[in-house]
Amino acid sequence: MSKYEKYLNTIDSGLEWLGQIPAHWNVQYSKWLFSERNTKALPSDEMLTASQKYGVIPQKLFMELEQQKVVQVLKGHDILKRVEQDDFVISMRSFQGGIEYCPYTGAVSSAYVPLEPQGNISRTYYKYLFKSKPYIQALQTTTNLVRDGQALRYNNFIQVRLPVPQIDEANNIGLFLDHETAKIDTLIEKQQQLIELLKEKRQAVISHAVTKGLNPDAPMKDSGVEWLGEVPEHWSITKIKYLAEITPPKSQLKYNNSDQCTFLPMEKLKTNSIVKDEKRLISDVIAGYTYFENGDILMAKVTPCFENKNIAIANDLDNGIGFGSSEIYVLRPNEKIVTEFLFFRLQEDNFMAAATGAMTGAGGLKRVPSDFIANYSMALPPKDEIPEIVSHIQIQQEHYDKLERQAHSGIQLLQERRTALISAAVTGKIDVRNWVAPTTSSDTNEVQQEVTA
């Protein structure tokens, strides 16, 4: 923020969340600036949805953007509230993420509180103020509600007095933030695109190594399997059931009733890792859960966990033993294969696509059949070649993981800068009255340089 000017004359706002403000700003009661709109929606009004991510937008657009359905009002339209363009809305999540701006006219849930701006005030300025970190924290102090999802009401809103810059100045703050946050959002989007590209490259490394090997000059042969295509001539074609035992029987388990084990609910099986913070007595879980041991490969069998590649190698289990969800496949590799090679092979795109296509069941309860896993054909390198392939994949993964961590770190820094910039501008900590939008995009590089410095 050092590159921005500060106001020369400031006064104490009298509000802890606001602190010092420019001497020519006012502080007013919220109810003088925004009244509660209590108008019933018309039958013809389009249904709107309030969200922290998009603001207040048409429900159909929200479902399209999020690719999910929301509860639609089919009856009792008369209980809905009307919201006008340029209103603000207190939604169910305002306690967590502030108050949403509405650029549309339509109908909203009766649980929402539409706010009608009064007089000549800057909508753009308050759009940013209501989403700023200091204001959200001030809003949170108006309630003792602790349960996630509790709603704020108009009574909460009017307890927080608001800063009132002069209208031209407020509008300029809004324009400044429109421009600066757009630059930051562009950089964030580029980092997100980089992360997706790194994931694709990582997957390409795995796919090529486990199906073609590392020698580009190796003679190739037709595998005879459609999804495998050509494979190195000296590799053999086999099936997973000859390389690993699928869901080993509990009769193999030796334990005492007092022994503990690691317990693994489905949500704690992740991509390449498991969360091992739950312990149970083996005697309490042996009857109803899937058994596994150190060195076993754990793979989700149900959608969408399978498509998310929730697969990991079990290690450091309590007493070397674990039990988990019945929706987990356990593969115990034998001496014919290296565990890590089979693990990477099960993450390969062709396998994932074929397994997804073979799923049975309906809706969100589709599962990969165990017969498909057992009879899946794969090319197997000579055993002395496998460690080199595994090592190559691991080295490449570490490289891409490092780049991905750097990209995530960059996104976090950009988001922090965005939050800090909004807070500083709307609370009068920086003076942007003389700011003029640049005519070129060169200042985007300045943001990148500041964040990475």
Image (spheres, rainbow, N blue to C red):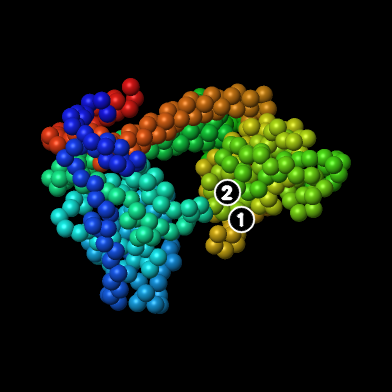
Q: Which percent across, then down, holds residue 387?
A: 63, 25
Q: Which percent across, then down, holds residue 330?
A: 70, 44
- Element under label 1? loop
Gap between marks 1 and 2 measured at Cα: 8 Å
Where the N terminus falls, by quadrant?
Answer: top left
| 405 in relation to 32, above or below | above
The amino acid type, in three-letter code, at marker 2 is: Phe
- Mark number for residue 367? 1
| 233 in relation to 359, above or below | above
Q: Nearer the viewer, residue 438 or 31?
A: 31
Task: Work out whether residue 238 can be spotted.
Answer: no
- Mark number for residue 136? none
The amino acid type, in three-letter code, at marker 1 is: Arg
Q: Which percent across, then down, holds residue 214?
A: 54, 26
User: Given contact means CB atoms under 8 Å apart, are the residues at marks 1 and 2 in contact?
Assistant: yes
Where on the picture, by quarter, is residue 299?
Answer: top right
Labels 1 and 2: the sequence-earlier one = 2
Q: Residue at (49%, 29%) from the top-left corner?
A: 401
| 78 in relation to 128, above or below | below
- Element under label 2? loop
Q: Residue at (49%, 36%) from the top-left corner?
A: 203
Residue receiving disc 2: 306
Q: Nearer the viewer, residue 300 or 122?
A: 122
Q: Residues within 10 Å of mark 1 (few under 14, many from 20)?
A: many
Q: Which percent across, then down, holds residue 134?
A: 35, 42
Q: Nearer the viewer, residue 413 or 196?
A: 413
In this rendering, position of residue 399 left or right of residue 277: left
Task: Work out whether residue 1 can be spotted.
Answer: yes
